[in-house]
Amino acid sequence: MNDINDQLVLIAGFSSTGKSASLRNIRDQDKWMYLNTEAGKRLPFPNKFKSFKISDPYQVYEGFDHATAHPEQFNGIVLDSLTFLMDMYESLYIYGASDGQKAWANFFQFFKGLMQEKVVLFNKPTIITAHVKDELDEVKHEMKTKVPIKGSLKNNGVEAYFSTVVAAKKVQLTELEKYGSDLLTITDEDRELGYKHVFQTRPTKATVGESIRSPMGMFTREQTYMDNCAQLLLDHLNRFYHGG
């Protein structure tokens, strides 16, 4: 068994930056499982995903187990979002627990089991979204933009469990045009608006406080920004790892 899933991606960003919309071009959607933790929030586009509303965190385990046991039925899994999933775990299994220390330890083990067992065993494209917030690093006296998480996970951050983390953003065209990315298409509509929803793939001088990351050589400087298209991102990962 492989000990990593090289088609694992974290799409992180503030609200209304295009995280969910980036899923719109995923191919063969009827062979993708969509795990919705956000109180049944609808995707902002028509789709054919096999959608499931999550009301208990362990249903996510069940979803990965089912997809792993039936690989012919599933090409990939979307978990939308990790932030709401972990908040749900806290609400159901930590508040009111008789042994708070044990409950928080289980919180960590739940996340670790998801990332290091369920995702790895599935070993197919897995897209996880997450919300971010700005937090002050009191040691370095600088702002950090991170996925908020509690307990022992807060020290390293959930981003440490992903080799590829992109930031969903709304960026002005004047900034985007500095790079000339071959993964970026600026449309007439974008020009009318003056901005575009994109993924940022590499940190810049202005964004060193963000947890954007990828393997060395995956993205060139010119590819710092790309279309906010999850399928385009997965195709890029596939070419990088497999030459496909």
Image: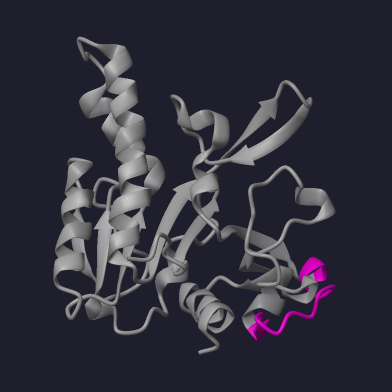
Q: Position of residue 71 (x, y in %)?
A: 20, 75
Camera-side residue: 224 or 62? 62
Question: Which residue is rendered at x = 41% and y = 64% of the image?
Answer: 5
Overall secondary structure of the magenta section: loop
User: In the image, 161: left or right of 203?
Assistant: left
- Is 95 colored magenta in this rendering? no
Q: Is residue 73 visible?
A: yes
Q: Is residue 109 above or below residue 67?
A: above
- Is 180 colored magenta in this rendering? yes
Question: Which residue is rendered at x = 48% and y = 72% of the image?
Answer: 230
User: In the image, 151: left or right of 87?
Assistant: right
- The N terminus lies in quadrant: bottom left
Which quadrant of the view contains residue 85? top left
Q: Is residue 194 visible?
A: no
Q: Position of residue 169 (x, y in %)?
A: 62, 58
Which quadrant of the view contains residue 181? bottom right
